[in-house]
Amino acid sequence: MGTTPFTGSPEELDLRRADSLAREIFSDIATKWALLIIETLGERTLRFSELRDEVEGISHKMLTQNLRMLERNGLIERRVYPTVPPRVEYTLTEPGLALRATVDGMCDWTHRYLGHIEASRRRFGT
Amino acid sequence: MGTTPFTGSPEELDLRRADSLAREIFSDIATKWALLIIETLGERTLRFSELRDEVEGISHKMLTQNLRMLERNGLIERRVYPTVPPRVEYTLTEPGLALRATVDGMCDWTHRYLGHIEASRRRFGT
DNA sequence: CAGTATCCATTCCGATACTG
DNA sequence: CAGTATCGGAATGGATACTG
């Protein structure tokens, strides 16, 4: 991503702003929980409690936090049904689905190279 | 990734081991710095200091730490030239290059959806 | 130059308690 | 059920100093 040196022209200013925004977004999503949530959601619609059960190891707090972040960035849609007890459903938006495609790639990669990695770790000495 | 319930059969045990390893690897690489280093390296060979300059914002410590981790997992090759002063070069391995392809996808995604995301954030109220 | 080691502030995150 | 708020311990990460 961007390494453009600063010159001061208006175009450069725009590029730099976009770059810093891109970096911010990248920092948001390039994390374990965010990517796992996106991967778990897939093309399904899940409730909060279903997500907590399926994204194994995630805490209540981390799930809430990451869901807010993903909603803020427009990757998921949050639908609230004002029933008692409340029912809240999460679905990937179009941008979210697009990102999911690349996350799928990462998961595939992980499984394809499991052997390589295990071997490399042994060579490295744990 | 895996949510296989535990049954106790040997096959299940193997699957669970592979799953937990996959999760561990995923945790390693699904981080900002690891992915940025892989993206920056690309098909080039770079020295430690070049990487530190190009991966903007990364500290000496984080670079070292992540390079060790990536080496341990076999994603990069570290070549040391015993000169004075020392020269150390890093290159993506084949697995590393394969992963890079998906990271490229993430970067493309980020730039393609910058507008969407900015708009979504405004809607959300920063 | 490319590390390692240490210190210290900040951030993260889990556990827990509480609300509509 | 699906949150929010708070607290304390653990992990993260930057700055700095030191080494081959």
Image (spheres, coloured by chain):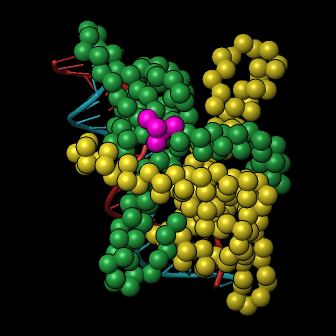
Chain colours: A green, B yellow, C red, D cyan
Q: Residue furthest bottom?
A: B84
Front residue of A73 and A84? A73
The number of callouts visible is 0
Identify which residue is drawn at 67% across, 78% down: B47
Q: Position of residue A99 (x, y in %)?
A: 53, 43
Front residue of B71 and A39? A39
Main structural element of the magenta stretch: helix, strand or loop? Answer: helix
Is A80 on the left or on the right of B62, as rendered?
Answer: left
- Tell me if residue B59 can be seen: no
Identify which residue is drawn at 79% across, 26% down: B14
Is B17 on the left or on the right of B34, as rendered?
Answer: right
Identify which residue is drawn at 82% across, 19% down: B10
Q: Residue furthest top?
A: A84
- Tell me if residue B51 can be seen: yes
Identify which residue is drawn at 75% across, 14% down: B8
The verdict on residue A37 being magenta is: no
Q: Position of residue A3 (x, y in %)?
A: 49, 74
Write down the quadrant of residue A101 in the picture.
top right
Task: Tell me if residue B65 comes above or below residue B49 in the rendering.
Answer: above
Q: Position of residue B36 (x, y in %)?
A: 56, 61
Front residue of B66 and B118? B118
Start and end of the magenta stretch?
A93-97
Is B1 on the left or on the right of B124, as rendered?
Answer: right
Q: Position of residue D2 (x, y in %)?
A: 33, 22
Front residue of D9 and B34? B34
Task: Tell me if residue B83 comes above or below residue A27 in the rendering.
Answer: below
